[in-house]
Amino acid sequence: MTIAFLSEKLSEIKESGLLRTLHRVQSAPFAKIKVDGKEFINFSSNNYLDLAGNREIYKSAISIVEQYGFTSASSRVLSGNLSIHEELESKLAEFKNKEACLVFPSGYQTNVGVISALMTNEAESCIIMDKLNHASLWDGAKLSGSRIFAYEHCDMNSLEKVLIRTSKYKIKLVITESIFSMDGDFTPLKDFTWLCQKYNAISILDEAHSTGVFGKEGRGLADYFGVENKIDISIGTLSKSFALQGGFVCGSKELVDFLINKSRAFIYTTAISPVICAAALKAFEIVEKSDEKRHNLINLSKTLKIKLNALGFDTLKTQSQIIPIVTNTIGNTEEIAKNLLEEGIYAPAIKPPTVPKEQARIRISLISGHTLSDIERLITVFK
Ligand SMILES: Cc1ncc(COP(=O)(O)O)c(C=O)c1O
């Protein structure tokens, strides 16, 4: 049977210039990648500390296969709870300075699974979100059925107004990202946590892009700002600085017990692979000792931002390794991305609905393995 509406919908997407197609990548996500047989400088990976393909991590992953195989072939609540899951969780809890931790098969699943389990559509609870929160945080909030309020991006005055407006709700969950995935800017975490405490709201912080990069030994932005103990629930992913796959949530022991009982994204899925857990335990050791890589990454980011701004490009308020280059129209962004590809640079266009229409952009994300000459090449092409 042909599904008639599919071609109609696809044509609509195409006409609006928003059709997504997949590129065929033939190498690991290093600073240089091979796509469709050609080599590019890769400015589109979250492999921030350049650990993808690390030999020590590789050996750890391989050695565990002998003991556990590739999968537990079961949910954690049935026969899928392996001792290596618990080992990883206690390491992550310690790293994030929290009582307990629970791992999920992906960062997306963690956000959806935690938020939708915690909140319900009961009249006395609500969720308060930064407008630019990641899709996975929005999807969790929507799935919860709870009332959702949004405040202006990173604007603590706007957050306070919403907190005042929602004072009738007994349970308030306030959710933000530490480094925003498309803008690269920071939530002012001191003010954020102060407001959450003042208005008796529960705080959730998604540290997907800051874990490994900021804070002591890469503990994240809450550690960097000294407010780790003021964040109630800390979420992260293994897919970025750890260059693996999987997500995790850290908080109280009660929170973890509750999620084991109530989080459908945890209960109704096969446990995260033991191979990933073994790799993550090794990746931790390396991440903690990666000050030089962090230093290099931040220096490269500062240099690139200064050079782009000097050429007149708008990089919004980035303070990190994620550098947006706003191009204003979808057509412009497509054109620039195409030109970059022709010049051997892989930095795809980011378009709506991922970002607002008037802020279509090229999103540069840097890896500690990039060199100054990679940066220079990008600058020359942008010139
Ligand atoms: C802020 C944020 N949270 C969560 C996720 C989802 O993580 P994962 O890719 O590990 O599923 C992403 C990923 O792109 C993200 O940017």
Image (spheres, rainbow, N blue to C red):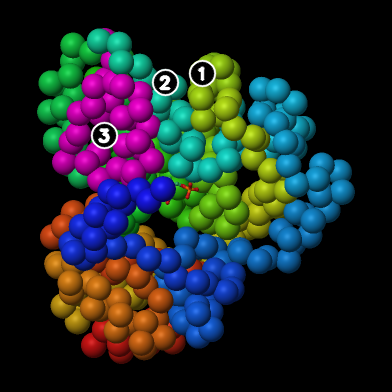
Crowdedness near tag 3: few (<14), some (14–19) or many (≥20) residues, C-alpha within 10 Å: many
Q: Residue at horizontal 82%, vertical 42%?
A: 68
**Is residue 127 a member of the stretch shown in magenta?**
yes
In the structure shown, which secondary structural element does the residue marked by tag 2 occupy?
Answer: helix
Crowdedness near tag 2: few (<14), some (14–19) or many (≥20) residues, C-alpha within 10 Å: some
Q: Amino acid at mark 2?
A: Leu
Residue interval drawn in magenta: 124-152
- In the current view of this chain or complex, which residue is farthest to the right? 66
85 or 105, which lies in front?
Answer: 105
Mark 2: C-beta under 8 Å from nearest atom of ligand 1: no
Mark 1 or mark 3, earlier in chain? 3
Crowdedness near tag 1: few (<14), some (14–19) or many (≥20) residues, C-alpha within 10 Å: some
Q: Are marks 3 and 2 in contact (CB under 8 Å)?
A: no
Q: Position of residue 84 (x, y in %)?
A: 75, 37
**Residue 87, visible in the rendered structure:** no
Structural distance between the alpha carbons of marks 1 and 3: 22 Å
Q: Which mark is residue 129?
A: 3
Q: Amino acid at mark 3?
A: Met
Q: Residue at horizontal 30%, vertical 43%?
A: 133
Q: Residue at horizontal 34%, vertical 75%?
A: 303
Residue under pointer 2:
118
Q: Position of residue 120 (x, y in %)?
A: 35, 16
Looking at the image, is 18 positioned above or below residue 264? below
Front position among marks 1 and 3: 1
Residue under pointer 1:
262
Mark 2 or mark 1, earlier in chain? 2
Q: Amino acid at mark 1?
A: Lys
Front position among marks 2 and 1: 1
